[in-house]
Image (cartoon, grey):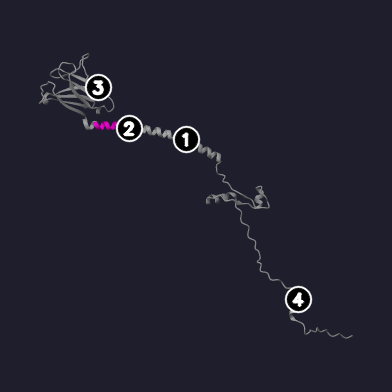
Amino acid sequence: MGASPARKQVLSDDYDIADDDEMYETRSHSSALRYKPQPKPVEHDTLEDLNIQKQRGTLIQRRSTPSRAAAEGGSSNGIASKAVSSPLKAPKSRVKLGKARKIGLLPVLAVFAGMLAVILLANGLMAFGSWWQVHQDDAQYGRPRTYQFDAVVGHNDSLANPTHFICINLNRHVEIIEIPGGDATHSRVYQGPVLFGNGQDLTPVTAQVRDVNGDGKPDLIVHILDQQIVFINTGTQFRSLNPGEQINLGP
């Protein structure tokens, strides 16, 4: 048998080329972007987070990962947050106790400061009073301490020419110089006591004349602080008071 002739596919006049699209499977258009997973953030240690938070000056709650939440006793399928507290922070009870002790010390410190101020003030006033007294004596008596006055005592003197007296504290040695009637050639020196003690070289020595034994002649009375030394007038000069001799030092 001979080979049959190849069949020819006859296209009809109705065939539409557009119908060929049904013979192919087409992919629908899509505008979605492909998701790219973000890299997992590097977890820092708690101490590092704490140091960073201290430098910033704030305390931030740190999110825990599921694995860390499970390790800390939280849920493994959720996100747990836990406030990070400073391990260097002292307990409130100790802080309150320290404040109470400080408050309790305040009255003691105030009393001590007040007593110290009073002592310093008293010492300052005493030092100032001593300095002021020495200053006044310097202005009135000079250095060495010297006191002078005139009086009529009957030793070749008169109202026109009274006797001149000089009382001097010369290096703690008290001396009374008499110049009868203003005549220095007949001057006499009467020795007084020697003063002892700190600062006695600046003690003023003063004197006055008054009859203390009732014989009508003015006697010499020397004043040294609260001490009085009497020299009896003999009519021509003065002498020391004898033991047991009666005198009247009243006004």
Q: Is residue 123 above or below residue 229?
A: below
Where residue 24 appears, x then y in whole percent?
75, 75
Outermost residue toward the right in this view? 1
Q: Which residue is mark 4?
A: 22
The 10 Å Cα crowd at callout 1, few under 14, some 14 to 19, many 20 or more, is few
For label 2, the residue is 125
Residue 203 location (% of width, % of height): 24, 27
* Contact, mark 3 vs mark 4 (Cβ under 8 Å): no
Of badges 3 and 4, the one in the foreground is 4
Residue range (magenta): 127-136
Question: In the image, residue 14 lies at what x, y percent?
Answer: 77, 83
Q: Which amino acid type is marked by label 2? A: Leu
In depth, the one of 199 and 165 nearer the eye is 165
Question: Which of pointers 3 and 1 lies earlier in the amino acid sequence?
Answer: 1
Using a 10 Å C-alpha cutoff, classify the residue at mark 3 as few (fewer than 14 neighbours), some (14 to 19) or many (20 or more): few
Point out which mark residue 105 bears.
Answer: 1
Q: Quadrant where the C terminus lies?
A: top left
Label 3 – label 1 distance at C-alpha: 53 Å
Q: Between disc 3 and disc 4, whose residue precedes?
A: 4
Q: Which residue is mark 3?
A: 227
Q: Residues within 10 Å of mark 2 (few under 14, many from 20)?
A: few
**Is the C-beta separation of discs 2 and 1 under 8 Å?**
no
The amino acid at mark 1 is Leu
